[in-house]
Amino acid sequence: KPTEPKVFDNWWARYSCQRASPLVCPNQNLAEELHILCRSRELEGLGINALAYERAISIIKSYPELITKETFSRDVMELPGIGEKIQSKIHEFLKNGFIEESRVIRQSERYQAITLFASIYGIGPANARKLYDIGLRTFEDLERYYDIRVGGDLKAIEPNMVTPNGKKIPPSTKIPEITVKVGIALRNELDAPIPREEVEAIYCEVMAQLNILEPGCEATIVGGYRRGKPRSNDVDIVITHPTKAKGLCKRFAQHLYQAGLVTHILHLSGFHAHDALRTEHWDSLEKALTVFILPEGTKFKRTHRRLDLIFAMPEAYWTAVIGWSGSKMFERDLRLYAKEEKYVDSAYRIESLSKSHLRRGLKFDSSGLTRRRDSLLYVPRSEEEVFQILGLDWIDPTMRNA
Ligand code: DGT
Ligand code: MG
């Protein structure tokens, strides 16, 4: 069993996978104000800008005490990822208790509408902006729009289709429309956060069904649940089987559908090489993104819930568990950290050269851990071993909320 690091060990480290990031941090209000700025950039398609904020937020989430003017100039200002722009926002927050730009954004019609549209499953930021630009503002607008688009004869009505403000719909709005329609129809249910107890009930039901179809599976609830979130937006489960993992995803999704527990299969992916260097054998994540409903007779109100089932071959199980536990920032930094051949910078008070130099030049993703120079595949037997191979101190899943 690995020793648990002190909660805020390594708060100054460069990569968020080297730092402990609790779910709720001492500077939560600041993190949330900055998050509005981050989210608005993301929704506007300003990815690099959004990432800069996301990085800064993740650094703040690891900082062990309340940021004051003193601690700010002593520690925080010096940290990698806190640039001038973000420094000035933090200054403003320290002075006023809020960030003016965040207030303005929060109240703007555009931000509210695009946030609303992008909250529907199947609508990403680019499409949310398109919907806004053609004049849609409310959920009712969106409903009407998709009723016309999906409900009617698409080809016949498309050229004349008119939006609430009278503008024509550009025919190139490429949205997976049937999927979006499911998202709209079930919006109230899919929007409702899932308490931990219900996540566990869903897991139990899934495992009972899996045991009928293919006994001997091993599985872990991953995603936000594993990071300790009291309520999740969906349920993510990583599953493996010693010998029958391959092809199990599709079989199981169909099984759940026939059992009436999965009402919609939004996406089903089998083995396809996402990386030409990898052989099919261990590019082994199959996914079913579904809508699930608990059977009658549980203590929970029957509510449609988003359920993601991820299947890994046994050799990829632990990287899959890590890769799907999140947070997204933690995952991103894990990849970067693994890749970095050596990292020494006297400006940062971090790691020894030997550790970083010896251990890296690796490629991490959910489907495996390899050495870049010769594609040597590691087969970790536990989550801890993945951290060891990477030369990382153990970070508990509940401290991966970067
Ligand atoms: P939430 O919103 O309560 O469900 O919070 P999370 O953190 O569970 O977010 P979710 O469910 O979107 O993603 C769970 C984790 O899985 C997250 O760390 C990112 C990862 N993930 C999500 N989609 C993909 C994907 O398509 N490929 C890979 N490799 N990872 C993914
Ligand atoms: Mg999730």
Image (cartoon, grey):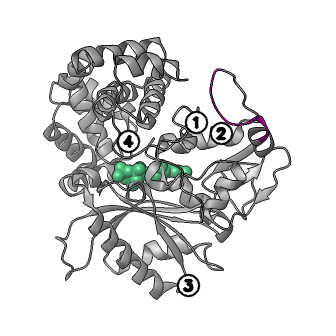
CA separation in Å, label 1 and label 2: 7 Å
Q: Quadrant of residue 232?
A: bottom left
Q: Mark 1 or mark 3: which comes first in sequence?
A: 1
Q: Position of residue 75 (x, y in %)?
A: 48, 22
The residue to which callout 3 is attached is 216
Secondary structure state at the residue bearing disc 1: loop
Residue count near mark 2 (Cα–Cα under 10 Å), binned few <14, some 14–19, many ≥20 = many
Which label was assigned to residue 15?
Answer: 1
Secondary structure state at the residue bearing disc 2: helix
- In front of the other: label 1 or label 3? 1
- In front of the other: label 4 or label 2? 2
* 334 with respect to 204 (left or right): right
In which of the image's four quarters is ligand 2 placed? bottom left
Going 48% across and 30% down the picture, which residue do you hit? 55
Residue count near mark 4 (Cα–Cα under 10 Å), binned few <14, some 14–19, many ≥20 = some
CA separation in Å, label 1 and label 3: 37 Å
Going 45% across and 88% down the picture, which residue do you hit? 212
Q: Quadrant of residue 389?
A: bottom right
